[in-house]
């Protein structure tokens, strides 16, 4: 049974609607719980549960002891009389019913507590070691910054590198970078502009991956929908690889390296559950240099082969043709102020062709020209 089915069954038990088979199943399950199940509850949770139990028992006692419910308000028969014996039997039966209610209530509550403990223990056994710190610095020399606002928050680190935290993101970094590398730990989305220092590489720990750079700009994003991490490179070169220390012993990684090297306008998506790295291109590629940014892209009856070479140089993305005939087609027009994919769409459409992204390359398909 999954968690939702167990919750429904426990609720049914508390309402007294379980069959004998269902009660037996619950009792067997509860007895199989580890004796230390309650240990996962915090003191506050234990106090709250205790107050609920006591409140429930107090309410039951108050109702059971009220006149007209089970205890006579006036008139006490003499001891030994038939009426007294009858009343005594009634009181004993009433007490037993109340005791049964108390025991059942407490048992139901304990079952729920045990169930919460069971789920809590399961939730505390992820593949990643929670709250483990990878930043190289004494705890007293660490700074934690969290963006609790609704707009991006820009930080300047001791090496003059900058980090722009998106809303809800958090980063831990040392007051001053020392040693042979610069390390920070990120939760959430952020954009980095790293000061170049070949003698002290910069490492970003995020989830199960590490992003290593010398001097570049890149973006790290958490995709909550796919439970994936994304790294997008704007300038420079970065390597992205799994963090072996982020795995518990039962989910330890093998000795094979699992990583990729990214260049401008490339990105990698890391799927934690399958430990798969998928490379591709960023949604909106940008020109990789100031010279390329200022260059005009005006073509007059130019071959697609030459246009593709110009785009490849400007964006750092390899562009290939499905066949040589397409490279011989020509184009006339101004592509200066357009996004890369818009440029490609216009050039291809004018020649009856199309393009598609294949990993970190762009493939142009079509019949071609004579």
Image (spheres, rainbow, N blue to C red):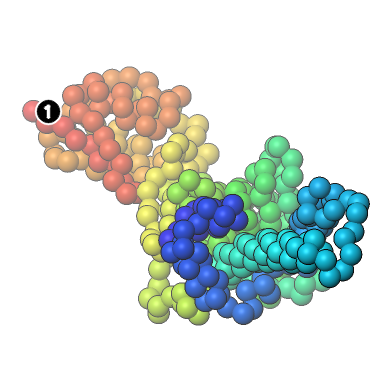
Q: Residue at x 61, y 65 (%)?
A: 111
Residue 58's place in the image compared with 33, above or below, is above
Q: Residue at x 50, y 48 (%)?
A: 223
Q: Quadrant of residue 196?
A: bottom right
Q: Position of residue 65 (x, y in %)?
A: 83, 55
Q: Is residue 201 at all visible to an observer of this figure?
A: no
Of residues 75 and 247, the one nearer the viewer is 75
Q: Position of residue 23 (x, y in %)?
A: 50, 64
Residue 89's place in the image compared with 316, above or below, is below
Q: Is residue 313 at all visible to an observer of this figure?
A: yes
Q: In which quadrant of the rendered image does the C terminus lie? A: top left
Q: Position of residue 194 (x, y in %)?
A: 62, 55
Q: Residue at x 32, y 49 (%)?
A: 359
Residue 333's place in the image compared with 55, above or below, is above
Q: Quadrant of residue 142?
A: bottom right
22 relative to 159 in the view: left or right: left
- The residue beneath circle 1 is 369
261 relative to 193 in the view: left or right: left
- Residue that sits furthest to the front in the current view: 81
Q: Residue at x 39, y 33 (%)?
A: 340
Q: In which quadrant of the rendered image does the N terminus lie? A: bottom left
Of residues 120 and 4, the one nearer the viewer is 4
Of residues 356 and 209, the one nearer the viewer is 209
Residue 250's place in the image compared with 275, above or below, is below
């Amino acid at each position: 049974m999954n968690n939702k089915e167990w919750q429904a069954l426990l609720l049914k038990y508390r309402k007294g609607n379980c069959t004998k088979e269902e009660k037996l199943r619950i009792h067997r399950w509860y007895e199989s719980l580890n004796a230390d199940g309650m240990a996962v509850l915090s003191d506050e949770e234990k106090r709250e549960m205790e107050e609920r139990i006591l409140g429930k028992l107090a309410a039951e006692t108050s109702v059971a002891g009220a006149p007209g419910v089970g205890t006579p308000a006036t008139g006490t028969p003499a001891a030994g009389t038939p009426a007294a014996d009858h009343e005594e039997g009634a009181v004993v039966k009433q007490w037993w019913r109340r005791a049964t209610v108390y025991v059942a209530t407490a048992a139901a509550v304990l079952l729920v507590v045990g169930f919460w403990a069971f789920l809590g223990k399961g939730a505390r056994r992820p593949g990643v070691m929670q709250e483990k710190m990878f930043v190289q610095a004494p705890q007293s020399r660490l700074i934690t910054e969290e963006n609790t606002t609704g707009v991006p928050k820009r930080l300047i680190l001791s090496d003059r590198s900058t980090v722009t935290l998106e809303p809800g993101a958090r980063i831990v970094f040392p007051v001053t970078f020392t040693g042979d590398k610069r390390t920070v730990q990120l939760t959430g989305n952020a954009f980095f502009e790293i000061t170049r220092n070949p003698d002290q590489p910069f490492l970003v720990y995020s989830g199960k991956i590490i992003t290593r750079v010398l001097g570049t700009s890149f973006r790290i994003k958490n995709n909550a929908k796919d439970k994936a991490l994304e790294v997008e490179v704007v300038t420079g070169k970065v390597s992205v690889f799994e963090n072996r220390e982020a795995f518990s012993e039962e989910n330890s990684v093998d000795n094979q390296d699992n990583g990729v090297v990214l260049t401008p306008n490339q990105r990698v998506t890391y799927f934690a559950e399958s430990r798969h790295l998928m490379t591709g291109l960023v949604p909106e590629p940008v020109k990789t240099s100031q010279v390329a940014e200022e260059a005009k892209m005006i073509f007059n009856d130019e071959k697609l082969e030459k246009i593709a070479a110009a785009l490849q140089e400007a964006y750092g993305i390899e562009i290939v043709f499905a066949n040589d005939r397409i490279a011989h087609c020509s184009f006339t027009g101004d592509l200066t102020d357009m996004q890369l994919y818009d440029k490609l769409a216009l050039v291809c459409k004018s020649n009856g062709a199309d393009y598609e992204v294949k990993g970190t390359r762009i493939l142009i398909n079509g019949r071609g020209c004579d």
